Image: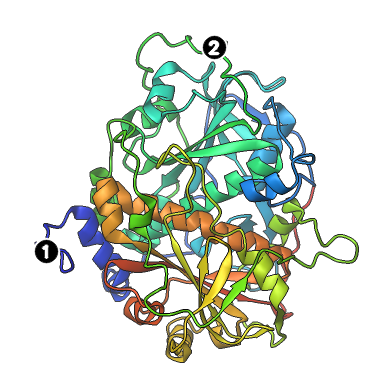
Amino acid sequence: MADPVTGIPESLGLRFWWRTFEGVQQLFAEGHGEEGGPDDPLPAKVFRGLPRRVLSEPARHIGDARWSFAGFRQARPEDAPSREVLDEPALSALLHHSYGLGRMESGPYATWPYHRVVASARCFYPVELYVWPAGAAGSLPAGCYHYDPAHHALTRLRAGGVPAELRAATGTGRDGTLGLVVAAVCFRKAAFRYRDYAYRLCAQEAGMTVGNVLLVGGALGLRGRVHHRFDDAVVNRALGLDGDEETAFAVIGLSPWRATEPQPDPAHEEFGGPLPVIRPRCVVTNAVDPAAWSGLAALDRASRMTGTGPPTPVDPDAFHLPADGGGEAASRIPLAQGKLAQGKGARDRVELAQALRARDSGGRMFLPDSAELPAHELAGLLRHALEPVPSDHTEPVCRPLVDCHVLVLNVAGIASGLYRLDAAPALLGLPGRDGRGVVSMLCDRTPSVNSAKANAIVFLSVNRLAGDRWFGDRGYRILHHEAGIVAQRISVLAAAAGLSARITNGYDDGAVRALIGAGAAHVPVFTLVLGRRRATAQYEPPLTW
């Protein structure tokens, strides 16, 4: 079958792009798995018979949410944190604030009681975090560990430092790496209900989790570099993953922020050859036949790689819409001076731990209040969204492979209408774009979210053809990760401004493309509804230490 835009033969990935983005109704045609019964997968992975270590109490304050952005650091070089050692307190703070429990919902309507610091569809949390420090972290021996967020504990899967085989398979270790964090996905935790559509949800959440690791690492003085192109078989074998129901999605190398000479790993040569196979035993509570999501498994198998990817870097410009967004910009609103209102005397500080505890999706029924959002607060939560992301796409860092459009509805000082966010950063007004139809469509498709009352709606889109051209069938996963990183930045900085950010996949793809002026190659992958949450009977106390 040929692609309708280019006429070239379609890969498995391209076919899945169309299926995923042009009809959520296909999800419903497949039928849902039962939720809330005894066959629900456990929300947190639990191992049996392996060494376990409860981590120390994580720091309640870890630093500014913007330390991972190079521009913010360059403006404050004397205050910028840099960590030379990944000790146990730092590891505790990194894991808890990256993917730990943030608050608990209680009361008669508490269907999804446990909320982590990253959004997840119906709180299924299919992402699993694994960490492998390069050496001993204080009293914590070197080794490969799985993070249990429910108990803030580590389960040791292997002993020893990061082996040479894993470094070579991921392209890490040349920059004084202090350790690796691997975001894996347990498909069953989402696919038991969402079937094949779970691949999109898992890729989205993995991207947001990776984005959060970068934010938290920056606040702690760690530079994170994302590795999308790695040898799947080696990484899965290293972590003891079966590669079918659970597989590695992204690897983050953590190093000191300040440039240092690469340091040898004292346990680097512990494994002289290929890593031996391990089969760690974990608790399984769901017995649904994986054949129910066979399309998901086929797409994931097609995306596998046997190395770290081609040495030729991608061309970032190939992934973006034309600079004018398909028409002349009527206005340009610089965002460089945007600040978040943090209270009297503290407007220039955005405590990341506080923002992560406050982050939410607006509750089950999200009805934003009618108060206007000050323009400087919108500027503050958007100005860093497109900052460069260190990754294995290019040797120098480049902006995310994502386009961002903002439909302003109720912002004091900014006229309602559609804007495009550029990397300057600035909002470029796009005249003649009537967003009323899209807002009506969102309210109709997702009645649990009153998008018409939002202060603003953010659309993140990617070039699916460029993703396929440069990354092959890996492109679907990579572009969702890129968009997820941006979505998490916006969500966290929105929380710091007192706003909820609701991610919704319930939208008509064609209507959004028509609004932002994109052709069939550019598809929206995230819609974020921003607004202040009204007081309701739903009670969600923060889980603080």
Which of the labelled discs sits on residue 267, or is there none?
A: 2
Q: Earlier in the sequence, mark 1 or mark 2?
A: 1
Q: Give the number of the mark in front: 1 or 2.
A: 1
Crowdedness near tag 2: few (<14), some (14–19) or many (≥20) residues, C-alpha within 10 Å: some
Q: Determine the secondary structure under disc 2.
A: loop
Residue shown at the point (86%, 60%) measured from the top left: 346
Q: Taking 105 as reference, is 309 above or below it? A: above
Residue 497's image quarter? bottom right
Amino acid marked by disc 1: Gly
Residue shown at the point (50%, 84%) measured from the top left: 447
Residue 304's image quarter? top left
Residue 410, position in %: x, y? 64, 85
Q: CA distance from mark 1 to mark 2?
A: 52 Å
Q: Nearer the viewer, residue 327 or 274?
A: 327
Residue 263, position in %: x, y? 58, 16
What count of labels does the image hold?
A: 2
Which of the labelled discs sits on residue 7, or is there none?
A: 1
Q: Determine the secondary structure under disc 1.
A: loop
Q: Taking 338 as reference, is 8 above or below it? A: above
Q: Taking 54 as reference, is 119 above or below it? A: below
Side of 286 relative to 215 (left or right): left
Judge whether residue 287 can be spotted in this image.
no
Quarter containing the N terminus: bottom left
Amino acid marked by disc 2: Ala
